[in-house]
Image (cartoon, rainbow, N blue to C red):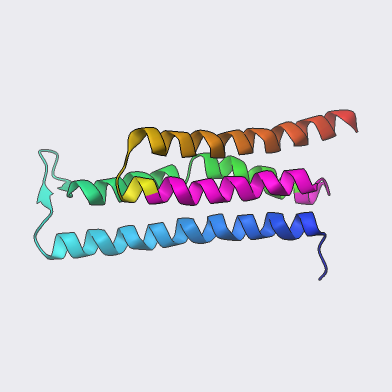
Amino acid sequence: MPFSQGTEMLLAAMLVQAWLMLLLLFALGGSRFATASSGKARRGKDGNLVFPERVEWLSACVNNQFQVPLLFFAAALLAMQLNMVSTLFAILAIIFAVFRIIHAAIFITTNHILSRFLSFVISALAVLGMWGLLTARILSA
C-alpha cells in the first residue's frame, strides 16, 4: 500500500516510539526480575519491593512513556484518519520520537535532570505543534 512521504515519516516515528516503549518495558521487567531474584530488592514498610536507584529510574522512565506519548499517538492517528498528514506534521513527529529516545537514554543512564527536562520540553513542544497544526486545519475546514 503506497503512502505519501509525510505519512511514511509519521509511521516511522510511530514505530520508533512504540518500539522504544516496548524495549523499555521489557528491560524493566528483566531488570526487576534479576534484581529480585538476586536478593538485591528489599521489602518496604508497605510490603512492596524496593529496588535500587537505577531500577527505579528505569521504572519512572517506563511510566513516563505512557504520558505525553499518548498525546503523540492520538494526534498521529487522528491526522492519518482525517488525511491531514503534512510534511511539517511528520517532521514534528520525527523530532518527538528522536527526543523521546534522548530523554529515555538520559533517564536510564545519568538521569541528569536539566538535560532530561530539556529533551522532554522539546518533545512536548513537538506534540504541541502537531496538535496546533491539527487544530488549525480542522478549524479552517
Q: Residue at x 41, y 49 (%)?
A: 104
Residue 119 sits above or below residue 49 on the image = above
122 within the magenta span = no
Residue 25 sits above or below residue 95 on the image = below
Residue 37 shown left or right of residue 138 in the figure: left
Assign the C terminus to one quadrant of the image: top right
Q: Position of residue 100 (x, y in %)?
A: 50, 47
Q: Is residue 62 visible?
A: no
Assign the N terminus to one quadrant of the image: bottom right
Q: Position of residue 81 (x, y in %)?
A: 78, 50
Q: Residue at x 72, y 49 (%)?
A: 90
Residue 5 shown left or right of residue 117 in the figure: right
Q: Residue at x 59, y 33 (%)?
A: 125
Residue sitting at the far bottom: 1
Displayed quadrant of residue 32:
bottom left
Residue 39 shown left or right of residue 79 in the figure: left
The magenta stretch is 80-105
Q: Nearer the viewer, residue 104 or 66?
A: 104
Residue 45 shown left or right of residue 136 in the figure: left
Displayed quadrant of residue 63:
top left
Secondary structure mainly formed by the magenta segment: helix
103 within the magenta span = yes
Q: Position of residue 110 (x, y in %)?
A: 29, 46
Q: Is residue 112 visible?
A: yes
Q: Position of residue 108 (x, y in %)?
A: 33, 50
